[in-house]
Amino acid sequence: MLKKIIVLISVAFVVLFVAYLFGVYQNNRDLPAPQSAQIKQPLEQSIQWLVNNETEILAQQNAMLWWMLYEANKISPDQRIAGLLEKYQQRYPRIQYSVWGPLFNSRQHRSLVGASVEGLPYYNQHFIYALNCAVNIEDDLVLVAQQNQPDFCHQPGYFYRPACITHQLMGINFLFTQQCNLLPNIDEVTQSLQQDIVTQLTWDIRVVDVYLQRVLMLLITGAEASVKPVWIQQVLDQQLADGGWGDFDRLLGSESGRSVGFSSKIISVGREKSSFHATAQGVYILSYLLKSK
């Protein structure tokens, strides 16, 4: 009986390992770069998702998501996105005068103290520090200074967080775009994080929210040449029928019901459902790609 159990476990392991290797091959195979026509329609569908879900997305104050739409609209203008952004600013007028204001007005910096961001998630602390060039809070908040180091996400407690490196690169990129001059080796740190993301995209075959975030960060930080065409195709293929993207990649089960699939928690049971978080990233990716064609 014990031998049978061992054999079954061994067979299951081999099958899963072979399936994973096939997934890695599929995720890294050579494909031609998508043409403009292959990007325009998915972009149109994703913008339509935003319009169709206006009430839901306007209920979300998350400035980072709206910044993605703001940047997407700057590089590929669309009146519908502009209209949503206007409604967002009308609903949350204080955003532009808050610590998140530089997202929408790069010339606006606020003087900060550590206590003003203490208690926020570690990556938000770093974003706010970088957006406002707030050198004075480096000494107050250890995690802020640590996130300027390329190996921050390799530490215990952070290496298992799938979005740690992309979040860190966002912060580093804000230091660059805001011209803070607070990190002398910023190019070295940026390149190190970009390489980490390339490695993640190569071996992590789950086309979920963080997959889009990884592709996005390579594109907007000057590493577009590192993005394999198949990774763009994976993003396009993962767009849902309603035009959005979500954080669940179905493997087994029906499209309408609960299924077994990949998620941010590796394997889970759930449903494919579009979210503002993933879709904002998808819109930014496609807008960027369309302009670069």
Image (tube, rainbow, N blue to C red):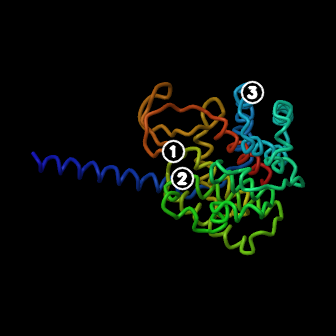
Q: Are marks 2 and 1 in contact (CB under 8 Å)?
A: yes
In the drawing, does residue 269 fall left or right of residue 56?
A: left
Amino acid type, callout 1: Ser
- Residue 215 falls in image quadrant: bottom right
In the drawing, does residue 143 fall left or right of residue 158?
A: right
Please tell me whether residue 56 is drawn above or below residue 245 in the rendered image: above
Amino acid type, callout 2: Pro
Which residue occupies the foreground of this view, 65 or 17?
A: 65
Please tell me whether residue 256 is drawn above or below residue 113 in the rendered image: above
Looking at the rendered structure, the secondary structure element under dot 1 is loop
Q: Which of marks 1 and 3 is nearer the N terminus?
A: 3
Amino acid type, callout 3: Glu
Looking at the rendered structure, the secondary structure element under dot 3 is helix
Question: What's the distance in space between the residues labelled 1 and 3, CA to CA?
Answer: 25 Å
Which residue in the structure is indicated by mark 1?
264
* Location of residue 18 in the rendering, given as x and y in whole percent from the top left corner: 35, 54
Which residue occupies the foreground of this view, 57 or 38?
A: 57
Instruction: Name the disc covering residue 54, or none.
Output: 3
User: What residue is drawn where x is 51% and y is 64%?
Assistant: 155
Q: How crowded is mark 2: few (under 14 residues within 10 Å), some or many (20 or more)?
A: some
User: What residue is drawn where x is 53% and y is 57%?
Assistant: 158
User: What residue is drawn where x is 58% and y is 50%?
Assistant: 211
- Residue 54 falls in image quadrant: top right
* Location of residue 278 in the rendering, given as x and y in whole percent from the top left corner: 64, 41
Q: Do the residues labelled 1 and 3 touch (CB within 8 Å)?
A: no
Which residue in the structure is indicated by mark 2?
162
Question: What's the distance in space between the residues labelled 2 and 3, CA to CA?
Answer: 29 Å
Q: Which of marks 2 and 1 is nearer the N terminus?
A: 2
Looking at the rendered structure, the secondary structure element under dot 2 is loop
- Residue positioned most to the right: 107
Q: How crowded is mark 1: few (under 14 residues within 10 Å), some or many (20 or more)?
A: some
